[in-house]
Amino acid sequence: MLLLLALVSVALAHASEENFDGNRVFRVSVHDEDDVSLIQKLANTKQIDFWKPDSATQVKPLTTVDFHVKAEDVIDVENFLEENEVLYEVLISNVKHVLESQFDSHTRASGHSYTKYNNWETIEAWIQQVANDNPDLVSKRVIGTTFEGRNMYVLKIGKDRPNKPAFFIDCGFHAREWISPAFCQWFVREAVRTYKQEIHMKRLLDELDFYVLPVVNIDGYVYTWAKDRMWRKTRSTTAGSSCFGVDPNRNFDAGWCEVGASRSPCSDTYCGPTPESEKETKALADFIRQNLSSIKAYLTVHSYSQMMLYPYSYDYKLPENYEELNALVKGAAKELSTLHGTKYTYGPGATTIYPAAGGSDDWAYDQGIKYSFTFELRDKGFFGFLLPESQIRQTCEETMLAVKYIANYVLEHPY
């Protein structure tokens, strides 16, 4: 009887999940405005899940566009591209197979693992554990709750001393970017593990505090584990719409909803009814406002594209300390590449990736945090959001070098 109940519950779980069998990911080469119009026409007639850029409105000439198509639309989409002589390649021929092969880590630990993707329940238990195990270096606080009522935690890492500058790092803005929370967990582990072994880390933690928010969009992250691996937004409800969620990285008061964002609640880049409408973005912004006198650097971790971005994304204008920021990410990208040869591009958000308003990095910069960055981690689209677990270690190791490079610079350039 118990076995039967277990089998029924497994069947029900799978019945409620999005089925990705036969779904495809395409990469289209966009040459001119005609190609842009064709992509937008396609997006209006078929349900297209844009991977890069985030929506049809952000497609521009002389770029490539990655998008995910349901199995039943694959033939129509291929015919449309071929009839219109649009150059394309298939990045992922069956999303379900790649989705299943994400879990290729040979660490089959039942609990938390730094080289596996951990679900929220496991991450939450890890947050308690890491704080309890390292009371001299780590403390945790709840900074708010999500729409669905889950606690949002910030871990403060550093030696307790008065008047220390701080570096704020967050992960997991977009639910499907699983490599992002994996990095925040790795960062905490490395900080704690190497504090007594490595002079650079000892100096960083003695002289800087790190505030780490391991998962911003917890509700969305839980949803990617339970129902739809490709979910991006929060899970809030909008009055008058049956669609769920807001794009938290379009919900900050920085050129809010002016460009690269949508006012449609069903869009993946929906900016929300007002800036900071989301409990998650409001909690993050409130925490930064409360600690503004000490926070000297801000980093938000996303995927994918292998990029290091600095403001602005909501406009083509450049920040005052543009030359300094560019030199800093150039150095960080070089440092990152020394480990596994991974190449990152860098520059201001609007020109390097695409214009997008309401982002947290632009908002943090406009609050006066002059070292403000977005990292887009691995890869460049071969796996996209479905980066296998076997790449977690290398991705996190190399990213760690870049973060330490920036942290050292911030320490040496007080303001």
Image (cartoon, rainbow, N blue to C red):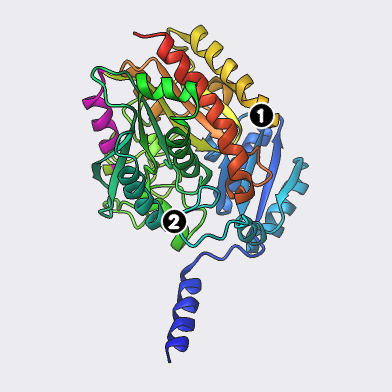
Considering depth in this image, is 63 or 309 the residue closer to the camera? 309
**Which residues lie in the magenta part?**
280-293
Alpha carbons under labels 1 and 2: distance apart: 28 Å
| Relative image position of residue 40 (x, y in whole percent) | 58, 41
Position of 137 compared to 12: left or right? left
**Disc 2 on helix, strand or loop?**
loop
Considering depth in this image, is 62 or 396 the residue closer to the camera? 396
Name the chief secondary structure element in magenta.
helix
Q: Is residue 314 visible?
A: no
Rate crowding at label 2 as few (under 14), some (14 to 19) or many (20 or more) other CA atoms within 10 Å: some
- Figure quadrant of the C terminus: top left
* Residue 336 position (above or below residue 215): above
Q: Which residue is mark 2?
A: 119
* Residue 408 position (above or below residue 306): above
| Relative image position of residue 250 (x, y in whole percent) | 39, 35
Taking the spot 46% from the left edge, 63% from the top edge, the residue there is 227
Taking the spot 53% from the left edge, 44% from the top edge, the residue there is 179
Q: Amino acid at mark 2?
A: Asn
Taking the spot 46% from the left edge, 72% from the top edge, the residue there is 13
Task: Say whether disc 1 or disc 2 marks the residue closer to the N-terminus.
Answer: 2
Q: Is residue 121 visible?
A: yes
Q: Nearer the viewer, mark 1 or mark 2?
A: 1
Q: Residue 339: which disc?
A: 1
Rate crowding at label 1 as few (under 14), some (14 to 19) or many (20 or more) other CA atoms within 10 Å: some
